[in-house]
Image: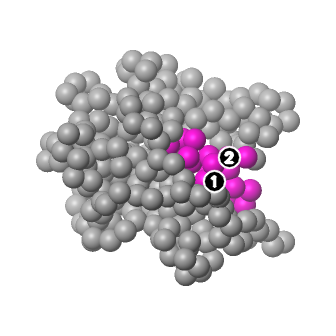
Amino acid sequence: FAAHPELDFYVYYIEKDTDVNFETGEKVPACEYLFDRLDLPQDRLGRYEVNDFGEFSLRFYRTDHHWNEWGSYRGYAELLDLLGVEDAPLNSTGDSVDLGTFSGSKATGAAAAFSETFYAFPMEFPEMDITVNGTPGDYGNREAFFAGEGGEPSYGGFYGWDAGEVAVSTGRADRENLLILGESYDNAVIKMLATHFNHTYAVDLRYYEAYMGETFSFSDYVEERGITQVLLIGNIDYYLMDEFRLEG
C-alpha cells in the first residue's frame, strides 16, 4: 500500500463456516487480526459477516464451499458501498430460477450421494467486451443455463471458472479502472461489479503465470492499464496462502 499512494486500495474479508462455531456462537477473530495490521482507513475495509448457522445456510451452498446467489448478490451490493459506487445495484430481471441439482466440492468423495438445487437470478447485463486469459468470449455460461442448454449446473460452470485474468470493458470512459485481486469467491461478482467501471481486471495469482505466460508484476500491471482502484477480496484462505502474496 505504501509503495502506491496513487492507488485507492480496498480489502473485503468474506466470513464463512470456518469463522464461526455454530454450536457456541464463538467467532474466530481472523478478520479483526487482519484489519488491525493493515495501514488503510476504516472505510476501505469491508467484511461479509456470518454470525450464525441460520444466516450461513441462507447465503452459502450446502454441498459446496462458495456463497450462493443470495450470498454473492449481498456481497456485490456491499462491495459497491465499499468502493464508493453511488449507482444502484443491478436488479434481477425475474424470480430466482431452479437450474437443476448439483453436488459441490463438499460432497466430493462422500460415501453417500448429496445434492442440492442450484438457483440463480436472471440478469440483463449491458454490452461489454470480455476476455478470459486473453481470449475474447463471455465469462461464465449464464445464458446457456437459463436456456436449458448448460447441462448440470455448478458454481464455476455458471459464474465462470477460475482464470488467470478476466478483463471486462464497458466503454464508460468517465468511470474508474478497477483491479480485483481474489480467488474463486469473486467469480460470482466480477461481471456485476464491472458494469459500474470503465475497465475491470480480475486476477487470480494462482493461475496468472500459467494462463498468461508471464510473471505478474503488480507495479507494471497497474501502470500499463491505468488502474485507479484495487480490491483485495477473499475468505481466510486467500489471506493465508502464499500463492496470493503480491510481489513487484
Q: Is residue 1 visible?
A: yes
| Residue tagged 2 | 59
- Which residue is located at x 76 percent, y 68 percent? 115
Q: For this view, does 67 lie left or right of residue 165?
A: right
Residue at the limit of the structure toward the front, as seen here: 94
Q: For this view, does 136 lie left or right of residue 18?
A: left
Cα separation between marks 2 and 1: 6 Å
Q: Residue 181: image x %, image y %?
A: 37, 45
In magenta segment, residue 63? yes
- Which residue is located at x 45 percent, y 38 percent? 88
- Which residue is located at x 63 percent, y 33 percent? 49
Tell me the crowding category of disc 2: few under 14, some 14 to 19, or many 20 or more residues within 10 angstroms, Cα based: many
Tell me the crowding category of disc 1: few under 14, some 14 to 19, or many 20 or more residues within 10 angstroms, Cα based: many
| Residue tagged 1 | 68
- Which residue is located at x 65 percent, y 58 percent? 96
Q: Residue 141: image x %, image y %?
A: 48, 71
- The answer to which image quadrant residue 39 occupies is top left
Question: What amino acid is at disc 1?
Answer: Asn
Q: For this view, does 148 lie left or right of residue 248?
A: right
Pick the front one: 28 or 59 = 59
Q: Residue 137: image x %, image y %?
A: 32, 71
Pick the front one: 130 or 97 = 97
Question: What amino acid is at disc 2?
Answer: Arg
Task: Decide: is 204 above or below 16.
Answer: below
Magenta-drawn segment: 58-76
Q: Residue 179: image x %, image y %?
A: 31, 44
Task: Decide: is 79 above or below 163.
Answer: above
- The answer to which image quadrant residue 23 occupies is top right
